[in-house]
Amino acid sequence: MGIHELVTVNASVDIDPDTINLKSKGKWITAWIEIPSYDVSKINISSVYLNGIVQAENNPKYGFVRHPKIEDIDGDGYPSLWSSSIDRRSRRR
């Protein structure tokens, strides 16, 4: 059993949709995480929280958890991780 050190880092996060319609029946809020000079494929999805409170979905029954997308969504040369999504119903906590 190894010791794991938790490190807090500054990251750019793009949340979609940009505006949340509280009457929407949509299930997910999507967060793209970008950390310049860091391999975003090494991010442990279970460590991702919205505002330090709401945890990103990390149940492997969802394809986006098993196979997260990594792409440069803003064209700046740094890949972003589609951090499994956050359940919209959790946003009000």
Image (cartoon, rainbow, N blue to C red):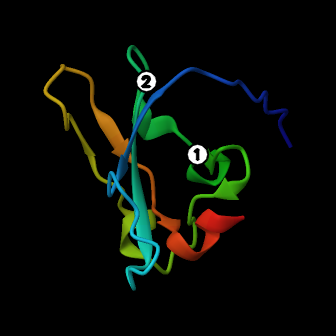
Quadrant in the picture for residue 34: top left
Query: Which mark sits nearer the N-terminus, 1 or 2?
Result: 2
**Which amino acid type corresponds to the residue marked 2 in the rendered image?**
Ile
Q: Nearer the viewer, mark 1 or mark 2?
A: 2
Corner quadrant of residue 25: bottom left
| Image quarter hosting the N terminus | top right
Q: Secondary structure at mark 1?
A: loop
Q: Is residue 77 left or right of residue 60?
A: left
Q: Nearer the viewer, residue 87 or 38?
A: 87
Residue 64 is situated, as x and y percent measured from the top left of the image, at 37, 66
Q: Is residue 74 above or below residue 22?
A: above
**Residue at the farthest bottom position:** 25
Q: CA distance from mark 1 to mark 2?
A: 13 Å
Q: Which mark is residue 44?
A: 1
Please name the residue that numbered disc 2 is placed on.
Answer: 35
Residue depicted at x 79% and y 27%: 5
Please name the residue shown 65% across and 58% down the image: 55
Mark 2, other Cα within 10 Å: few <14 / some 14–19 / many ≥20: some
